[in-house]
Amino acid sequence: MKVPLLDLKGQYKGIREECRAAMDEVCDDQYFILGPKVVEFEKNVADYCGSKHAIGVSSGTDALLIALMALDVGAGDAVVTTPYTFFATGGCIARTGATPIFVDIDPVSFNIDPEKCRELLENVPERFKHLNIKAMIPVHLYGQCADMTHLLAVAKEFGLKVIEDAAQAIGSECMMDGEACRAGSMGDMGCFSFFPSKNLGGFGDGGMVVTDDSALAEKMVRLRNHGSEPKYYHPMVGGNFRLDALQAVVLDVKLARLEGWHADRRENAKLYDAAFTGTEVTPPTAVYADSGITNYHIYNQYIVRVAGRDDVRARMQNADIGTEIYYPVPLHVQECFSDLGYREGDMPESEKAAAEVIALPIYPELTEEMIKYVISNIE
Ligand SMILES: *Cc1c(COP(=O)(O)O)cnc(C)c1O
């Protein structure tokens, strides 16, 4: 049997005609960039997330970049984030000219630890003291929300803006003040990616920023189009961060099915969880599973910890099972950030996770037989 880490062909089979009809409409219109189809999709994403505004952009990376630009983050500023994430989170901070300051993760959730954030902000290392710490970017890693209640309290206390990196977590929920809130809608801005392997993936690159703040929304609408307003007048410098209509219509078709796919991923996760409990393989902890919300986790990735990870991975490869390591090198020890003064050992939980984790196939179309095959080959 062959079980790839992700197989999008099965999903496409079920939506092929609808996608092609929607794309045909765009081709007939010849309206390819932004326009009414993008506006419609933006409205649907805003509604889905429980946010007032949504701004379609060219990728998840550009969503993070434009959110930072909207806050005027730049040289002399710093942004607090997790070192245990996809590179874009830290990369975008650096691209604005600002300095990323890393805070280690909570080993249970893999998300940034609010108490360690507070400790850092109360006792900023000497080398970062000249910087203006303007914002925080928590990442909802693997599809499970970071501890937003505590993070927002810390951010408020220290006057930081909050940009949620919800690239892996569209639709994921957590409780805030007794209310279920969706990823991206809790901070000042939330960023999504429509990279094909995300739960809501396009036919190429795409992204979105959501916010309740009308002024930020308006600013991002300008920034994604070279900061122009009106056309050919530039009160600010932006870029080309626009979303294509072809992506918007495909994503709209998929958005209508997203809740079902999330549920299928959760069902797959339950099969794995049951099989791994009490074994050498440590299943992921769904920290909000008992809080009465549906999307307590959307399992963009199903991540286990296992001793001898690299051997396990090689064995699975021999059995034709696709796996991946998200992520092998935490950001604080990436070569491009070596001038920030971090050393190996500075972020022990992130480093430990990087050495132990392995991602297993979790996509909605997996059969029970395939999942059993994965389980029988990991141990
Ligand atoms: C995928 C991802 C991004 C970047 O999204 P792209 O659309 O690939 O640019 C940013 N942050 C995280 C956590 C991601 O998983």
Image (tube, rainbow, N blue to C red):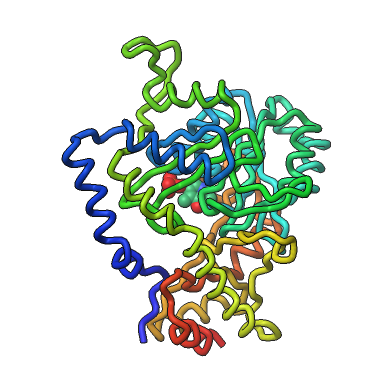
In the displayed structure image, the side of residue 311 where residue 240 appears, left or right:
left
Position of residue 105 measured from the top left corner of the image (x, y, whole percent): 69, 54
For the residue pair 304 and 223, the one nearer the viewer reads as 223
Residue 107 can be seen in this image: no
For the residue pair 48 and 266, the one nearer the viewer reads as 48
The structure residue drawn at horizontal position 82% and vertical position 37%, both measured from the top left corner, is: 123
Position of residue 125 measured from the top left corner of the image (x, y, whole percent): 76, 37
From the viewer's perspective, is residue 94 above or below residue 250?
above
From the viewer's perspective, is residue 134 above or below residue 113?
above
Q: On the image, which quarter does residue 350 sit in?
A: bottom right
From the viewer's perspective, is residue 287 above or below residue 138?
below
Residue 6 can be seen in this image: yes
The structure residue drawn at horizontal position 43% and vertical position 81%, both measured from the top left corner, is: 367
Task: Classify the position of the C terminus by image quarter.
Answer: bottom right
Task: Classify the position of the N terminus by image quarter.
Answer: bottom left
In the displayed structure image, the side of residue 260 where residue 28 appears, left or right:
left
The structure residue drawn at horizontal position 74% and vertical position 47%, both measured from the top left corner, is: 176
Position of residue 265 measured from the top left corner of the image (x, y, whole percent): 52, 69
Residue that extends furthest to the left in the rendered view of this protein: 28
Give the number of callouts.
Answer: 0
The structure residue drawn at horizontal position 68% and vertical position 82%, both measured from the top left corner, is: 277
Position of residue 361 measured from the top left corner of the image (x, y, whole percent): 47, 73
